[in-house]
Image: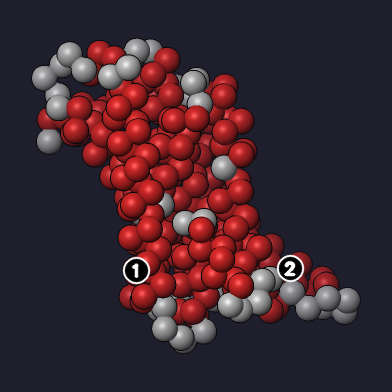
Amino acid sequence: MSAITTLSRGDFINIRRDSLMQFLLIYPVILGLVIRWLIPWITAGLMDTFDLTPYHLLLASFFGLIIMPDLAGSLIGLLLLDERDENTLTALLVTPMPITSYVLYRVITPTLISLVGILVLVPLIGIDVPSMDQLLVVAISASLGAPIFTLLLASLAKNKVEGIAVMKGMGVLLMAPMIAWFVPQPWQWLLGLFPTFWSAKAYWLAVAGESYLWVAAVGGVYAVGIVWVLLRRFQNGLYK
């Protein structure tokens, strides 16, 4: 607990002095409120030329479910890059704090932020919302992917400037479910190569009243496997 308290205090200080990180924290609420109003407004405006209603589920899952792990993972990834720039990671290796505790903290934090964010954001948007028990299962599956964004950012970027560019590149993970929506069965499942696909697919199935638990489970296990591989790479890099 002392390690968690120390790390949390450091994160708070870093976030307080960085306007980008502060924006990432409040962005989900702003986004939810805007999308809650924007989708019905656009739908009504296009009604005479194009029916947007069939795509409400896609839009709700993208803005309510898929984006949140990216935001949470990127936020913690930027904190990691800050600590690397300040040589905090190097200093940790000679402190009494076990490096395992630090690594677990950096994995669990974006997961919890993402989970809470999804549970707030989806009902806030209020469009094609599954039941709370369904949403909880899907949210857990999706939030397990948040550390993927954190560890990718920490692995691919050498500093925060490069981190911003990497964040844009990671957008391909967000687009995979959007593309999958338009791909017919069974070819749609090929997009399962991207971890973000599984939670989105589970969301669609849950709203449609179809079997979704196994899809959410596969997505969660797949995300944990990717996190494990990235985590080993990250830990090995600490000692170089």
The residue type indicated by label 2 comes to Trp
Q: Which residue lies furthest to the right in this view?
A: 49
**Placement of 222 over or under 44, stated as above or below:** above
**Disc 2 on helix, strand or loop?**
helix
Q: In the rendered view, does 186 fall on the left or right side of 115?
A: right
Q: Specify how the rendered protein is coloured.
A: secondary structure
Q: Name the residue under label 1.
A: 217
Q: Position of residue 112 (x, y in %)?
A: 32, 50
Give the side of residue 79 with respect to residue 48, left or right.
Answer: left
Which residue is at a point 49% across and 21% down the rendered structure image?
158
Q: In this view, does 35 lie above or below 137?
A: above
For the image, the number of numbered tags is 2
Q: Tell me which amino acid carries mark 1.
A: Ala
Circle 1 — which element? Answer: helix
Q: In this view, does 133 lie to the left or right of 52?
A: left
Please identify, in this view, whether the residue under mark 1 or under mark 2 is nearer the observer: 1
Distance CA(mark 1)–CA(mark 2): 35 Å
Task: Tell me if residue 70 comes above or below residue 23 in the rendering.
Answer: below
Image coordinates of residue 235 in percent, x first then y, are 29, 30
Q: Earlier in the sequence, mark 1 or mark 2?
A: 2
Q: Residues within 10 Å of mark 2 (few under 14, many from 20)?
A: few
Could you say where residue 68 lies in the image, as x and y percent from the top left? 48, 52
> In terms of image quadrants, where is residue 164?
top right
Residue found at the far bottom of this picture? 209
Q: Which residue is drawn at 34% across and 31% down?
A: 234
Q: Where's the C terminus, which quadrant?
A: top left
The residue indicated by pointer 2 is 41
Residue drawn at x 68%, y 67% is 39
Task: Using the image as rendered, state which of residue 2 and residue 95 is in the foreground.
Answer: 95
Give residue 166's mark.
none
